[in-house]
Amino acid sequence: MGTFITTLAEYLWVLCIGSLLLSLVWSASKSARITILILTLSGLAQDRIAPLLMGISETSPELARLLWYPSWVICQTLTLGIIWVIHRKFVWAVEQITQFICLSILMHSVLQVARFTDRVHIWH
């Protein structure tokens, strides 16, 4: 599973950076552009965290299981919070694309919580 994630992450980076560059060339709202930038930076942070968690799994699989899903939920919650704070600070309207991205992040977090709950319930 770990190699699949790292392989997929390489392609996602191309997509994220391509989207960011496209938003600079093609007319995009400030809301969309900053959301894509924050999403890209969040992805970078999560790519740095994943190897650390995989390293923990080699020495303490039980601890890694307890850290894996909450780590992503925390990262995604911070991403949503930063997007919200930036929009509030600059008094930007939240565009439809930003709403879609934030809803996607929120739903992914809900799935992470559900999977974590399932995993913890199965282990005990």
Image (cartoon, rainbow, N blue to C red):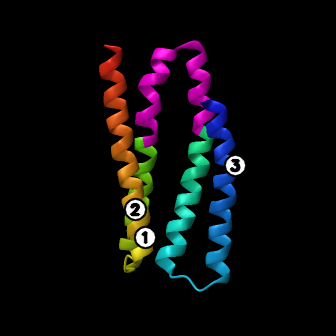
Quarter occupied by the C terminus: top left
* Residue 85 in view, yes or no: no
Type of the residue with mark 2:
Cys
Type of the residue with mark 1:
Thr
Picture disc at residue 118: none
Instruction: Classify 114 as above or below 78.
Output: above
Within 10 angstroms of label 2, few (less than 14), some, or many (20 or more) residues?
many
Where residue 119 appears, as percent x and y from the top left, is 37, 24
Instruction: Classify 55 as above or below 113.
Output: above
Type of the residue with mark 3:
Glu
Please report the bounds of the magenta region as a residue range.
49-72
Question: Circle 3 is placed at which residue position?
Answer: 10
The overriding secondary structure of the stretch rendered in magenta is helix
Q: CA distance from mark 3 to mark 2?
A: 22 Å
Picture disc at residue 98: 1
Q: CA distance from mark 1 to mark 2?
A: 6 Å
Q: In this view of the protein, which residue sits in the foreground, 62 or 74?
A: 62
> Element type at marker 3?
helix
Question: Circle 2 is placed at which residue position?
Answer: 102
* Residue 49 in view, yes or no: yes
The number of numbered discs placed on residues in the rendered structure image is 3
> With 100 as the anchor, is 13 left or right in this view?
right
Where residue 43 appears, as percent x and y from the top left, is 57, 51
> Element type at marker 1?
helix
State yes or no: residue 60 in magenta: yes
